[in-house]
Amino acid sequence: MSVLVNKNSKIIVQGFTGSEGTFHAGQMIEYGTNVVGGVTPGKGGQTHLDKPVFNTVKEAVDSVGADTTIIFVPPAFAADAIMEAADAGIKVIITITEGIPVADMITASNYIKDKDCRLIGPNCPGVITPGEAKVGIMPGFVFKKGKVGIVSKSGTLTYEAADQVVKQGLGITTAIGIGGDPIIGTTTKEAVELLINDSETEAVVMIGEIGGQLEADAAKWYKNSGSKKPIIGFIAGETAPAGRTMGHAGAIVGGSDDTAQAKKAIMRDCGIHVVDSPAEIGKKVAEVLS
Amino acid sequence: MNLHEYQGKDILAGFGVRVQRGIVAQNAQEAVAAAKQLTEETGTGWHVIKAQVHAGGRGKGGGVKLAKNLQEVESIAGQIIGMNLVTPQTSAEGKKVHQVLVAEDVYYPGDSEPDEFYMSVLLNRGTGKNMIMYSTEGGMDIETVAEETPHLIFHEEVDPAVGLMPFQARRIAFNLGLSGVAFKEMTKFVSSLYTAYVKSDSSLFEINPVLKTSDNKIMAVDAKVTIDDNALYRHKDYIDLRDLREENPIEVEAKEVGLNYVDLDGNVGCMVNGAGLAMATMDLIKQAGGEPANFLDVGGTADAARVEAAFKIILKDPNVKAILINIFGGIVRCDRVAQGVIDAYKNMGTINVPIIVRLQGTNADIAKELIDNSGLDVLSATEFQEAADKVQQVLA
């Protein structure tokens, strides 16, 4: 098993014919991902990358049975694209777009909360289940199949962690990039819960950063769950100054409880194997699993 | 984007929020003219001269003063403009004051005692909804209130589907202990404040204090307003409100060439792709015995031009004793980045600090070969720990 995406997922690309959408859809198809089509309003009926283009997500759901979408729509229109996907009955909505206004995300997350769907992102690298489906912008070759799940707010730091895990002779079940924005669809806790409940996943790597309470919430849930499945954690930004946004819109220390130090203390307290050095993530996973 | 007090108040007033009136002045003469005009328009006898800088706690640093006549307006304005204002929120050198706000005196005597409250509007990241946070303890540092008397801080969360409801505005006014005219004034104040927050696409409003005057008016005496940068495209009229003098000049320059850069105090510069990996690299520098001199995310395209621009930005900081380049090549190939580093290095002539280049991912082996055979004084690494060891080595 794996979580969120697999070889049977029927994936569409919103913003399919744009430059980002075209490039990454091409990479996904080359990886072997089951891309069944794409959506670009006004270009319905055309064929792009040998796949059908639809005007609306609803059409894609009705015609090719799409159940998963990846969104490359520009920031000004991305929240609308998320709501369209949710309305059409898409189950997994993965949003790569960076720079969506917070007000738009408040509206979108409120709109989708009673719909039967899960939003990943925005401002994330996507989700990959190695050997089955790459629904994101990550370099596929880094992620070898295995038994370690990854949850992370960051793109390249996820690749770094996966690379370290693979170099220890281990591999990945599913890596979930949850995104670095202040409002994201799937929280650290929800993503960790999915992996803890996945029978194939034997350990979870949880990578967070300064700002917000997501890692602390995940850690507390983990402690209360009583799960014996180990979690290896790292929090980036110990050296970041308070009150400054560090690249990701959500990465900003607001008070004393959302610093890297505070988060790591809570995680340790909840039984998570926390590493202080980002160079030791892979080593720690191997040590814990041995 | 952070705004000055006077700019924030302009936005608030535009949505019907009552604010302490004022006129901005660039020098002492303008301040006197502003004071005369304000007296004509508002009848105020005294004036408050307020330094306009992007930092809180201005009063504590001597940046807010009362002037009881025009001579005092002139001398106080002359003294504040040009000073380096040091507050608990600035560095030890302080911030240079370029302009002051000459404001009406709103603490005049009357039928009742004036009273100060605290109010802010912001996103509750935990619930994904906006909330109004408020307190009876106005005019103080809210962090102190949160620590000492947390029961005096209240929250009102807003349902995005319907917006702020009248019963919520009433609850706020009741919790602040108001009645009569002041109660009605407060409900109006809260509603228009929330409307202003939403319509201006702000990510923070902090009004401290909100004042109940002696004649029961409710008004914003200060305004800290932050606009959501991602929403600026729908507010073209706000773009000119950005005051580059308030920002770090190197950060401004970096932004112009598309680099995400934050200036820090350390001695090891870094250049990384991706925000999370950039923070992790800063942390690694610290563990290797250095201190990060900056945060720098070069983004997805690390070609020669970008690497060169990044080098130039990092080297503007005289404290930089070494530079660590950490790129995880995914879509961007490491050999391209390596070539970019080599070309940039050659274009710049001499770089007088040691450089450690760690390239991992697509074509990392070819990249290492390129660097090793370039004849340049550059140390190469492929593993993260190896990069840390080399940083330690050059700092020793």
Image (cartoon, rainbow, N blue to C red):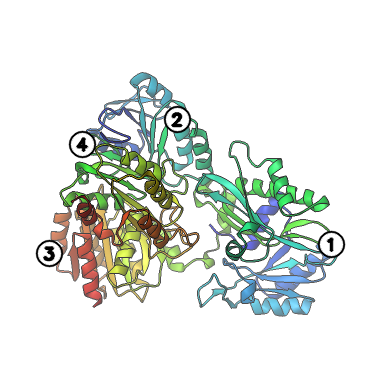
Instruction: Name the subunit of mark 2.
Output: A
Q: Earlier in the sequence, mark 2 or mark 4?
A: 2
Give x and y (percent) for residue B345: 24, 67
Query: Label 2 crowding class (10 Å Cα cut-off): few <14, some 14-19, many 20+?
Result: many
Q: How far separated are the C-alphas under marks 1 and 3?
A: 81 Å
- Residue, disc 1: B112
Tell which tag, 4 or 3, sits nearer the viewer. 4
- Name the residue nearer the viewer: A245 or B21: A245
Q: Earlier in the sequence, mark 1 or mark 3?
A: 1
Residues at marks 2 and 4 touching, judged by CB atoms closer than 8 Å: no
Element type where label 4 sits in the image: loop
Report the side of B383 relative to B189 (left or right).
left
- Residue, disc 2: A86
Give x and y (percent) for residue A95: 39, 39
Query: Label 3 crowding class (10 Å Cα cut-off): few <14, some 14-19, many 20+?
Result: few
- Name the residue nearer the viewer: A60 or A204: A204
Q: How far separated are the C-alphas under marks 4 and 3?
A: 36 Å
Quarter that holds the C terminus of chain B: bottom left
Label 3 is placed on what type of residue? Asn
Give x and y (percent) for residue B67: 75, 75
Label 4 is placed on what type of residue? Gly
Report the side of B160 relative to A287 (left or right).
right
Element type where label 2 sits in the image: helix
Mark 3 on the same chain as mark 2: no
Tell which tag, 1 or 3, sits nearer the viewer. 1
Give above or below for A262 relative to A189.
below
Q: How far separated are the C-alphas under marks 1 and 2?
A: 55 Å
Mark identifier at residue A131: 4
- Residue, disc 3: B373
Mark 1 on the same chain as mark 3: yes
Mark 2 on the same chain as mark 4: yes
